Amino acid sequence: MPTYIKQGDIPSKRHIIFEKPEGGLYREELFSTHGFANIYSNKYHHNMPTKLLENRIFDIEHGQPWQNALIQNYKLDSRVLDRPGHFFSARNQLFYNADVAMYSAKVTEDTDHFYRNAYADEIIFVHQGQGQLLSEYGVLSVKQWDYLVVPRGTTYQLKFDDYQDVRLFIIESMSMVEIPKHFRNEYGQLLESAPYCERDIRTPELSAAIVEQGEFSLISKFGDKYQQSLLEWHPFDLVGWDGYVYPWAFNIQDYAPKVGKIHLPPSEHLVFTAHNFVVCNFVPRLYDFHPQAIPAPYFHNNIDSDEVLYYVDGDFMSRKGIEAGYLTLHQKGVAHGPQPGKTEASIGKKDTQEYAVMVDTFAALKLTEHVKHSMAADYPSSWLE
Ligand SMILES: [Fe+2]
């Protein structure tokens, strides 16, 4: 999605004969979005990507809806929910609506399964851990505090160097995750004024095709339903590909924040857009430079958005009792703002070292039972003095 990429061997034109040196044809797969009307990639396989041995139902439980959750401000410790699992089975669903779902995960083990989220793009924020994202498109290095943007339909595996301390925050988007249009010029290049540019974006490197026959387990997620497909050929059998659709990485530390004379609204810290929600982030930055500025935010009531914050690192300026791995949900229709003492404490401060990921959804979020089991019950009344 960031830009056009070509890797490996591809024919001179789309949809023409492309012969293997040993004879026979490579198999072209068009991987397209919005029908055939938006960005796409063309992938060239050694084998037909349809060579299926068997399909089976597969069960993964991510969390039950919490039917009677109050509309209020929430704080929760996602670490309470930690359980053994690999990069897609360990996900605990916290919040969801028709546009987006959010999960935390403590990944404790590797798996040989391949994974494909068929209906949703994923933004995987790697809070702790490093390794590689392996996909048909090649190898993408994974660093701590990366956003990994994985288009729907991508067959991939996440491999970590070790599984002592791997923690993820996953945003599942039912619409395409995009770099905000106003970050780009008319040619698609990221603008001088954008908070990141092409140099900050890492893309997969294709190496030799894996041409192995056997029985390979692909777990696909179709909305709430999982299915296991046994494939005859290793899915990473590409000799080449080109296009705009592929997984990519952007590290939160490469985000260049805006600084204002007086407090800038959170929307100035935008990272990604999608239909009906946005992702912003808070990163270390200088505070406002008006001599009477109040760096802490004002009380606000986002009357048309629910606001989720995932706390990554540093001392968060407007909240008390927050540690890395905590989340807050401030729901629309309910005011929130700095906790007692935080406004006064922020006056005169020159900078902040906080890191946090924020998801603002324009439709109300629903909660799962995981929130009930990890929430601080006294948070809604924590503004009392
Ligand atoms: Fe807020």
Image (cartoon, grey):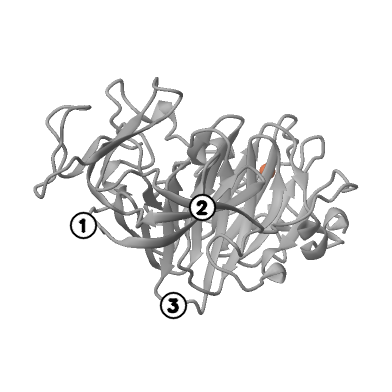
Tell me the tag on residue 38. none
Tell me the tag on residue 162. 3
Residue drawn at x 62%, y 46% as measured from the top left: 294
| Mark 1 vs mark 2: in front | 2
The answer to which of 145 and 319 lies nearer the viewer is 145
Residue to which mark 2 is pinned: 54
Q: Is mark 2 within 8 Å of ligand 1?
A: no
The answer to which of 21 and 368 lies nearer the viewer is 21
Tell me the tag on residue 207. 1
- Whole-percent x and y of residue 291? 54, 44
Tags 1 and 2 touching, CB below 8 Å: no
- Whole-percent x and y of residue 303? 75, 30
Distance from label 2 to label 3 (Cα)?
Answer: 32 Å
Residue 172 visible from this viewpoint: yes
Residue drawn at x 44%, y 46% as measured from the top left: 150
Dividing the picture into quarters, in which one does residue 24 lie?
top left
